Amino acid sequence: MKIVARTLNDLPEAAAALLGEHKASRIFALHGEMGAGKTTFIRALCKRLGSDDNVVSPTFTLINEYRGYKGEPLYHFDFYRINSISEAFDFGIEEYLTGDYFCFLEWPEKIEQIIPEEAVIVRITVEPDGSRIIES
């Protein structure tokens, strides 16, 4: 699947399309350079799932929890600052990845060897005109 988001206004539709394409999926691993818009896209995904929470990057906390339509947790991880996979194990990442709730992973390459194979790999690239290409 390939989505072109020319502006931030395109993100709600892009989030709906991605979630619609991967209805059975709960784990989304978002790849992209610094500033590509991973957190901004996760904000749109969480909004689509009913969250009114303030979705921000968990760069220093590693994980943020939001609430969806029915109060179910939505987990947002940022592995940018971890130095080894053992840090992810220290906070119980495997329990999140084997659970029934949505998990959105930024910088998943830092824990690549433990990401379940059913995870949706999402790549966000920035075009010269500033638009984002979102591929899964």
Image (cartoon, rainbow, N blue to C red):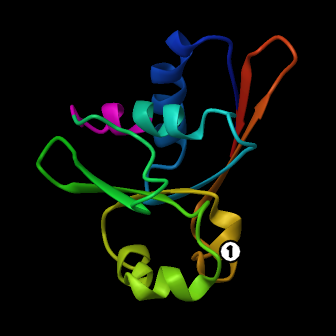
Q: Secondary structure at mark 1?
A: helix
Residue farthest toward the right in the current orientation of the protein = 128
Which residue is disc 1 drawn over?
112
| Residue 35 as seen in the image, left or right of residue 98 | right
Where residue 19 appears, x then y in whole percent?
Answer: 47, 41
Answer above or below: position of 81 versus 92: above
Image coords of residue 107 (percent x, y): 64, 58
Q: Residues within 10 Å of mark 1 (few under 14, many from 20)?
A: few
Left or right position of 5 against 46: right
Q: Position of residue 113 (x, y in %)?
A: 68, 82
Q: Is residue 99 above or below residue 67?
A: below
What residue do we see at 61% from left, 33% from top? 37
Q: Magenta stretch?
A: 45-52
Q: Position of residue 118 (x, y in %)?
A: 58, 70
Q: Is 28 placed left or right of 94 in the picture?
A: right
Which residue type does callout 1 highlight? Answer: Glu
Q: Is residue 127 visible?
A: yes
Which quadrant is home to the N terminus?
Answer: top right
Can residue 25 be seen in the rendering of this structure?
no
Q: Nearer the viewer, residue 104 or 98?
A: 104
Q: Is residue 63 left or right of residue 14?
A: left
